[in-house]
Image: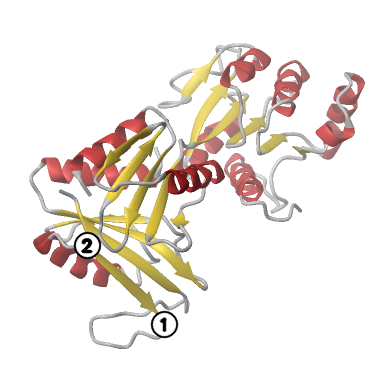
């Protein structure tokens, strides 16, 4: 790999831009597709470029059939927005980071959202609906609400439901969740949208401690990401 | 910070220190291979490595090949599977097959 190609790839990653590295496995020649720019010693025709762009859109690395080309897709990291800088969040955030998520913790209660409690994490003390709207969840974003407080959780969920977020969950018992759905229903959210909220949060693995609950949530997000059957 | 980005950043740092560096990338898999397509392993001239291309079954063999790629500059396309039985090739315990592209970082 040419050093200029690697440096361009690393720069794009640092800027969180999607790029694709295309390698001819016969010759070793490579091209980095970065927006409309192509860097490297491999020439790509327009038909191939379209196929590479499709691979980026599908977030799928692999060989391009009927060619000697391999496409390595480098999409920006998955994102997780955690509403509620609570005890469970202190377990969930590092686990989600290990799993590859770029995590933002949202909590307008400044006693909770502190750097001491959440080192090395992006914190927002905006109201959850404003914070979510600013973060613009996309189909590579998970939204997790943990506060149990309808004033904080519900507005965040409403914004999340208007997005393509691939995983939306809200902490709370079955009873709490039923009440939450009733409130949102009363605000005009339809059943198809409500069904997108996984609740109670996390896979049913008998989780009790904050760390165990965090495991169940990261596991459920993984399941949602890869399109596995829901349980 | 994801594990994947660490691999390339470490490769760049090693190169900055003047070390020979090779990158191995899983470019195809069949059956139950342990690491998906796109997984990467960086290797330096001393045999230090970061990342993975399998669950540990073939890394040793890939490091050996990577050193040769560092010397010659010629990339290699390697295949490892359960059927490989020759001296320098190793099999995957899981029964899958992986194809690994190894290149020198210039």
| Residue B40, x across and y down, in percent | 34, 55
Label placed on residue B75: 2
Left or right? Give the position of A47 relative to B11: right
Up-down relation of residue B11 to residue A143 (above or below):
below
- Residue at 88% x, 29% y: name it: A190
Tag 2, which chain?
A: B
Left or right? Give the position of A89 relative to A29: right
- Residue at 47% x, 79% y: name it: B95
Viewer-closest of B47 and A40: A40
- Residue at 34% x, 65% y: name it: B100
Q: Which residue lies under the disc numbered 1?
A: B82
Label placed on residue A160: none
Q: Could you tell me which secondary element the residue under label 2 belongs to?
A: loop
Viewer-closest of A135 and A216: A135
Left or right? Give the position of A48 relative to B67: right
| Residue B76, x across and y down, in percent | 24, 66
Q: How many callouts does the rendering have?
A: 2
- Residue at 26% x, 53% y: name it: A29
| Residue B38, x across and y down, in percent | 41, 55
Tag 1, which chain?
A: B
Left or right? Give the position of B43 relative to A55: left
| Residue B90 figure quarter | bottom left
Residue B33 in sight: no
| Same chain check for tags 2 and 1 | yes
| Residue A172 figure quarter | top right
Q: Could you tell me which secondary element the residue under label 1 belongs to?
A: loop
Measure the C-alpha gap from mark 2 to mark 1.
23 Å
């Amino acid at each position: 790999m040419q050093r200029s190609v690697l440096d361009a790839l690393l720069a794009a990653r640092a800027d969180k831009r999607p790029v694709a590295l295309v390698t001819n496995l016969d010759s070793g020649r490579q091209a980095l597709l970065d927006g409309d720019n192509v860097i490297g010693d491999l020439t790509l025709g327009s038909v191939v470029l379209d196929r590479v762009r499709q691979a980026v859109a599908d977030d799928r690395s692999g060989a391009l059939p009927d060619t000697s080309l391999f496409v390595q897709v480098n999409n920006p990291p998955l994102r997780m927005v955690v509403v509620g800088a609570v005890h469970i969040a202190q377990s969930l955030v590092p686990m989600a980071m290990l799993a590859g998520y770029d995590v933002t913790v949202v909590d307008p209660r400044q006693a909770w959202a502190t750097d001491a409690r959440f080192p090395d994490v992006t914190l927002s003390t905006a109201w959850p609906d404003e914070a979510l709207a600013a973060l613009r969840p996309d189909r590579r974003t998970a939204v997790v609400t943990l506060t149990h407080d309808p004033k904080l959780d519900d507005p965040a969920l409403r914004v999340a439901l208007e997005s393509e977020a691939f995983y939306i969950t809200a902490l709370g018992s079955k009873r709490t969740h039923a009440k939450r759905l009733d409130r949102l229903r009363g605000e005009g959210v339809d059943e198809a949208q409500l069904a997108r909220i996984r609740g109670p949060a996390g896979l049913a693995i008998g989780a009790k401690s904050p760390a165990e609950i965090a495991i169940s949530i990261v596991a459920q997000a993984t399941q949602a990401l890869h399109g596995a059957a829901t349980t | 910070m994801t594990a994947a980005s660490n691999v390339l950043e470490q490769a760049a740092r090693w190169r900055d220190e003047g070390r020979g560096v090779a990158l191995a990338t899983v470019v195809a898999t069949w059956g139950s291979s342990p690491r998906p397509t796109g997984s990467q392993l960086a290797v330096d001239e001393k045999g230090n490595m970061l990342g993975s291309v399998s669950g540990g079954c073939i890394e040793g063999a890939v490091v050996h090949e990577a050193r040769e790629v560092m010397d010659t500059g010629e990339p290699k396309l390697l295949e490892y599977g359960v059927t490989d039985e020759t001296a320098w090739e190793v099999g995957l315990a899981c029964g899958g097959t992986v194809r690994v592209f190894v290149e020198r970082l210039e």
